[in-house]
Image (cartoon, helix red, strand yellow):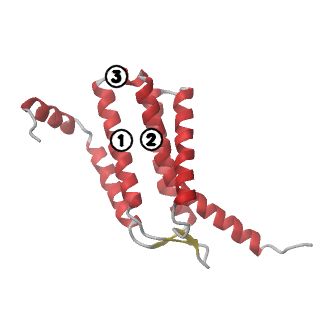
Amino acid sequence: MIYSTKESMMLQEILTHTPLWVWFILLFLISRGVKASQDRRVTFKTMLLLPLFMLLWSLQGMVQHFGLQPEVGGCWILGLGLGLYTVLKFGNQQAVRLTEGGHFQLRGSWKPMLFLITLFVIKYAENVLVAMVPALKTEIGFVVGVSLVYGILNGLFLANFLRAICLTINKNRLSEPQTV
């Protein structure tokens, strides 16, 4: 594919006007994706960090660009439910295990890297598009699409954390004295 000089200049303009901190976020996300590709043992708090970061980052973008519209929240919640359902229904049930010491053993996977990079690209593209065409902030198809994708990705990230909560509750329920 050959790009014209105008397209090359536009791409160069976009990249040079991207704040430096954006590239640090990309590096952070890549490092988290690489870490997620390996089996590891983590605490409950550590399991919460990445889904919480992704949730806040998505919500910040939606509120910043679209405001607190019912369509935005509704599409995000719908997407969240779809993401959660997909992983909880069809995902690897052994991806999270509770260990003796109360930690969680996470099975390594490259899927989180895919989801992290997807979220970064969506967020980057959203910011570029809104900067170039501010009217997109009120274009219902754009608003619905972005909100739905953010929700789906947030659901994918929250699913294993919810599994960890369920494992903890079940362990505590089983360890409590039973009364008849």
Judging depth in this view, the residue of 21 and 124 nearest the camera is 124
Residue at 44 percent across and 43 percent down: it is 57
The local crowd at label 3, few if under 14, some if 14 to 19, many if 20 or more residues have their Cα within 10 Å, is few
Q: Is residue 30 left or right of residue 97?
A: left
Task: State which quarter of the image contains the C terminus.
Answer: bottom right
Give how far apart the Cα atoms at labels 3 and 1 are.
Answer: 16 Å
Residue at 55 percent across and 56 percent down: it is 159
Task: State which quarter of the image contains the N terminus.
Answer: top left
Residue at 45 percent across and 24 percent down: it is 140
Residue farthest front in this picture = 90
Q: In this view, does 31 lie to the left or right of 64?
A: left
Task: Label 2: state its secondary structure.
Answer: helix
Task: Label 1: state its secondary structure.
Answer: helix
Residue farthest right in this picture = 180
Give the answer, above or below, for where 105 lies relative to 60.
below
Report which residue position mark 1 lands on.
122
Report which residue position mark 2 lands on.
149
Mark 2 and mark 3 in contact? Answer it, CB < 8 Å: no
Mark with earlier residue (2, 3): 3
Picture quadrant where residue 35 is located: bottom left
